[in-house]
Amino acid sequence: MVAEPELAGQVAIVTGAARAIGRVTAEALAARGATVVSIDLTPADETVAAIEAAGGHALSITGDVTDEATVGRAVDSVLETYGRIDILVNNAGLFAGLERRPFWEIDLDEWERVLRANVRSVFLCSRAVVAPMRAAGSGRIVNIASNVITFGMPNLMHYVASKSAVVGMTRSMARELGPAGIAVNAVAPGLVTTEITEQ
């Protein structure tokens, strides 16, 4: 008798799954049996096609995860379609393409753009999935941070600050949601070579 995949029947949302780390994460979850939903500014058609070609199930929702109304509609759509949300991977964010400069030369608009993409999105998406996860008595939230929080990085202070915030948020969320059966963790990778970092 062949055992069911470990995530069979579960539904996972991965933000920023159109490419790079998000796409690989989505494909890995699907390979373990999860139905994967991408929420990304860019349509994740290639991710969905790759998952379906491998026999999995996936859906792409195009939207801005820094916008409260968009996140709410996306989560509602997932619940209407699948009836549950078991896993959230907060992967969407800004890194590649950021102009490296001393912190005193970072203008406020750029500072706020990075914090909006890397911190606000984690807050909005996590908050949006809490109700269905609490109702189910279980869930998993994984936040993608970075190892730069341990040693800093010159000329990218806005990025370092944003990922430090993600780790702090993860710790607080874990303590608040743990009693409800919801695990919250952060993954802090080093530089990962992807089509984004090679740009």
Image (cartoon, rainbow, N blue to C red):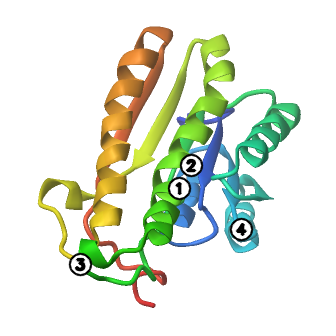
Among the two numbered marks 1 and 3 on one chain, the one whose residue lies closer to the N terminus:
3
**Position above or below: 52 against 106:** above
What's the residue at 64%, 68% (across, down)? 18
Circle nearer the viewer, 2 or 3: 3
Q: What amino acid is labelled 1 in the image?
A: Arg
Determine contact: label 2, label 3, CB under 8 Å: no
Residue 5 seen in render: no
The residue singled out by tag 1 in the image is 116
Label 3 – label 4 distance at C-alpha: 34 Å
What's the residue at 46%, 56% (across, down)? 115
Going by the picture, which residue comes out furthest to the right? Answer: 80
What's the residue at 61%, 62% (across, down)? 17
Q: Which mark is residue 44?
A: 4
The residue singled out by tag 3 in the image is 102
Q: What amino acid is labelled 2 in the image?
A: Ser
Label 1 – label 3 distance at C-alpha: 20 Å
Determine contact: label 2, label 1, CB under 8 Å: yes
Among the two numbered marks 2 and 3 on one chain, the one whose residue lies closer to the N terminus:
3
For the residue labelled by badge 1, is the local secondary structure a helix, a strand or a loop?
helix
Residue 133, percent across and down? 62, 21
Quadrant of the image containing the C terminus: bottom left
